[in-house]
Image (spheres, grey):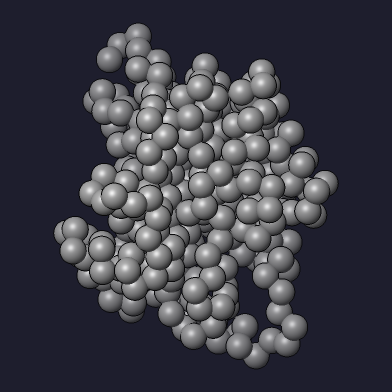
Amino acid sequence: MAGKRFKIIVHGGAWNIPAEVHDSHIHGIERALNEGLSCLRDGSDAISAVIRAVIAMENDPTFDAGQGSFLNLNGEVEMDAMIMDGKDLSFGAVAAIQNVQNPILAANAVRLQSDHCFLAGNGATQFAHKHDIPYWPTENLLIGRELERYQRLKLKKNYKTRDFFDQVCGDTVGAVAIDTTGNVAAATSTGGTPNKLPGRVGDSPVIGAGTFADNQSGGVSSTGWGESIMKVLLAKTTCNFMASGQDAQRAAESAIQQLAKRVGGLGGIVCIDAGGEHGYAYNTPYMARGIADQSGIQHIGI
């Protein structure tokens, strides 16, 4: 694949990431980039690369996706994920899915093996297991950090989800890639917000909010306060800016400005435009992110 251009950008959440976990986020981002990069170097397509990158982060308890997901108000793990192919605009999404290790695989199965685009709740879980995605007990998804957080939050009065993005929260994961043929793909996966109501669905699996990809404009994965991100369809808004002629970096900045101005939202995005340029922006204290191309890893930051 020498001389062929490709790129992948990933994120591991936009929030006030404490200093003591910066290293684990950096290492997790590096692993995800290497997985996606290996895929692209082997000549695989952008869809395969974002799946590999997201699985690496779902399997890493550092992040709020797959293993390490937050618990809802009832002490259950409910996860959301979406994947989209910019070539044909096909997408698959799952919401409030339980008992799978890798929700992104369930989302891709919906895309490829059903007549639907979006499955939720028990139906999504049953579909995943029917399509060879193994049952994964809740206790295998749960880690001590989240059990302790759940127990603390049960004692709090007047808890508001927004508070966590200023203080402690986050870790939705996502990836965007462009392959050697110019096809773009995006994927996002999350365990949602701490202490959420059972059945709550955030932006990650909502087309145009948490995830969007179109070869004519680019691909985007969002992270942050989902209720605000959905209101402005942050991922599609970013793609619209790219389609109007803004490069990826300017489009990312414009979209985050709109998120803040219109709805007082908090979050971050990573994106790649149709020309292969990347961008990222956030208005939270930190966002874990990384970029790699045919020359290797170019940037990892918090």
Residue drawn at 52 percent across, 52 percent down: 206
- The one of 295 and 225 positioned closer to us in this rendering: 225
In this view, 62 is above or below 155: above
**Residue extending furthest toward the top:** 3
In this view, 45 is above or below 62: above
- The one of 69 and 226 positioned closer to us in this rendering: 226
Residue 195 x, y percent position in the rendering: 57, 78
Q: Is residue 213 left or right of residue 247?
A: left
Quadrant of res 200: bottom right
Residue drawn at 67 percent across, 28 percent down: 241
In this view, 10 is above or below 245: below
What count of labels does the image hold? 0
On-image quarter of the N terminus: top left
- The one of 69 and 97 positioned closer to us in this rendering: 97
In this view, 33 is above or below 7: below
Residue drawn at 26 percent across, 51 percent down: 114
**Residue extending furthest toward the front:** 115
On-image quarter of the C terminus: top right
Residue 101 seen in this snapshot? yes
Residue 25 seen in this snapshot? no
Q: Is residue 109 left or right of residue 198?
A: left
Residue 246 x, y percent position in the rendering: 68, 21
**Residue extending furthest toward the right:** 261
Residue 212 x, y percent position in the rendering: 51, 39
Residue drawn at 40 percent across, 19 percent down: 182
